Structure formats: structure tokens, C-alpha cells
Image: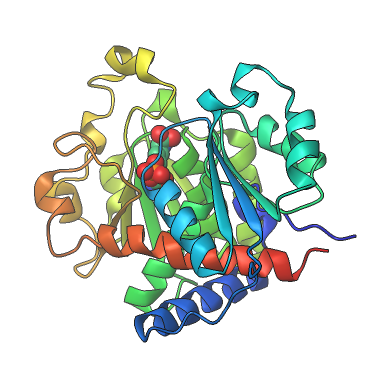
Amino acid sequence: MTIRHFLKDDDLSPDELIEVLDLADRLKAERAKGILDVRPLEGPKTVAVLFDKSSTRTRVSFSIGISELGGYPLIIDSSQSQLGRGEPIEDTARVLTRQASAIVWRTGDQSRIDTMAEHSTVPVVNALTDQYHPCQLLADLQTVRERRGRLEGLTLSYLGDGANNMSHSYLLAGANAGMHVRIGAPEAFQPDPAIVEQAWALASDTGGSVTVTTDPAAAAEGTDVLATDTWVSMGQEAEKNDRAGVFNAYSVDDALLSKAAPQAIVLHCLPAYRGLEISASVIDGPQSVVWDEAENRLHAQKALLTWLLERSG
Ligand code: CP
Ligand code: NVA
């Protein structure tokens, strides 16, 4: 039995990534015409969607997406489940996989979702961990392709907390797509060196590249895509005071955006904190594509689930 999981960005090969993005584009175009005839979850089959952390976009897009694929989204907040009271992940996996057709999980350390996948006989999808946010990257790459017509050869610059899940996913997914990925982050918040190395290995096959710098202007210079994220991720609330001030030079404001290519687009996975990692003038301005990006979570995840289910079993 083959089971395809999506636990981190490079669980899809470069060709498979394009297949998923092409399907996402098709599903989006058909939906706009009222056509919803891709229904791999018809029955309805159930997808268990578990949250150990807060969510708006991920919860909404998986709920609606699973329904549109003909299935039933079973949304479980861990605070209301035995998993949240310490039931082993292995046992939770054994119970869920006998009843659900896929498992989607937002949790903390990546090792938790790896354990879930090891004990699951249905596809497991990472809906954000401390280390990666690969579903977000599918939506981001779909958005970039819509605006630029391609991914290969484009430069994508991420500014802010280089050690967080979005930074790591930009590194892997961007390199997988043949992009030139730049991370601009303070010395104390640089990406995990093992992930940078992995991104380089991917980039050497796809024609992309990886640059990590502490210089925000150098990271933004001439870039095609400027991206940022909160400076205080979920679970880091106690570090908020220590982090205050460290990232100010990396704020995506008009001055930083002016260093990018004239037609550069701006991404933010949301939720955004205006006046901190991004200015109101930029996120609400003409180069921002964050609302398309948020909508594309729906189309990209529908494509991903369809693709994983087709190849598992
Ligand atoms: N971007 C994102 O994952 O948003 P939520 O935390 O609201 O799901
Ligand atoms: N880095 C953020 C992303 C939120 C979607 C966090 O983990 O909180």
C-alpha cells in the first residue's frame, strides 16, 4: 500500500508540485463558473482536521474545501479531545485512520506530525508546525504564478523571523520551484542550517539558489516577490518582549518595498500586525496580493487532497 503524506514542502517533487498547482488553477477556474465536479471524497468520506493551535484561514479553507470535494470535515480542537489530555499520538493515529480518509493537523514540533504519519494508513497533511507551513506555500506559489506566469527564475525575498515555519517553508518550496530564495533576518533569528542545506540541495537540481543575510536592503534589492510574517509566532508569546525591537529594520514598509523590482508583489500569510512586520500602506497598497493568497488556500488544498488521495491506497 502506498500512502502519500504532505509533512513538509519537499514531500512533493518539483514535477509533482507543478501538477498540484496546475490542478489548483483548474479547480479555481471551474469553481468561478459554478463547476464543482472533482469529488474524490464523495460518500461523504470524512477528513479529520485537528488543531492544537488557533486558526482562521486554515480552518475555513479546509472545512469548505473538504465539503466541496464531496466530503465531511470533522474539525477537532485538541483542547476538546483526548489528544489534548496526553493520549499518545500513535493511538490517536490508529483510531482516526480506521474511520477517516485523511488527517490534517496543525501542531507544534514537526516530530509530532511525523509520528502521526508513521502510524497512519491514510494521507497526513501538515496544516502548520513550528518548523513548516507547507499548505501556505502551495497557496503562495499559486498566487505568484497567477501574477507572474511562472516561478522558475524569479527571486523571492522573505524578511523577518528567519527561524520560523514560514521562512523554512519559503526555503524548501521556493528552491523546489526553481526560485532564488533570499532570507533577510537578524543574526539571532537565522534559519535552521540543516534546512538551508536541504534548500541548497533542491536548488542545485532546479536551477534555483539560496541567500541568507542579515541585511534587509540586500535581501529586498530588485526582488520579484517580497514576503513577511509575524515576528511572534504561535507558542512564542512569552518571548514577545525579548523580540520587541529586534526586527524593526526588517519591517516591510514603503522604504523597503522601493528597493524591490517596480512590479514586485507582496505576500503575507496572515494574520498581519500592521505597523510591525508590515506597514498598512504596503499590505493595503496596490502591490499587495494577500487576499488572493488567502483565497488560494482553498484551491491549493483541494488540489493537494485530491492529488494525495489519488496516489494513496
Ligand atoms: N495563514 C494561516 O495559516 O492562517 P490561520 O492561522 O488563520 O489558519
Ligand atoms: N509563523 C506564524 C504563521 C501563522 C499562520 C505562526 O506560526 O504563528
Q: Quadrant of the N terminus?
A: bottom right
The image quadrant of residue 81 is: top right
Q: Residue at x 66, y 53 (%)?
A: 6
Q: Nearer the viewer, residue 152 or 187?
A: 152
Q: Residue at x 34, y 57 (%)?
A: 294
Q: Quadrant of the C terminus?
A: bottom right
Where is residue 217 shown, x and y percent of the image?
25, 45
Q: Residue 4, can we see it?
A: yes
The image quadrant of residue 120 is: top right
Q: Residue at x 29, y 52 (%)?
A: 220
The image quadrant of residue 185 is: top left
Residue sitting at the far left: 281
How many numbered tags mark residues here? Answer: 0
- The way the protein has been coloured in the rendering is rainbow
Residue sitting at the far front: 43
Left or right, 173 with reference to 56: right
Q: Residue at x 37, y 13 (%)?
A: 238
Residue sitting at the far right: 1
Q: Residue 178, can we see it?
A: no
For residue 73, above or below residue 84:
below
For residue 290, above or below residue 161:
below
Where is residue 299 shown, x and y percent of the image?
46, 68
Left or right, 25 with reference to 49: left
Name the quarter showing ligand 2: top left
Left or right, 8 with reference to 212: right
Where is residue 229 shown, x and y percent of the image?
33, 41
Left or right, 230 with reference to 212: left
For residue 46, above or below residue 166:
below
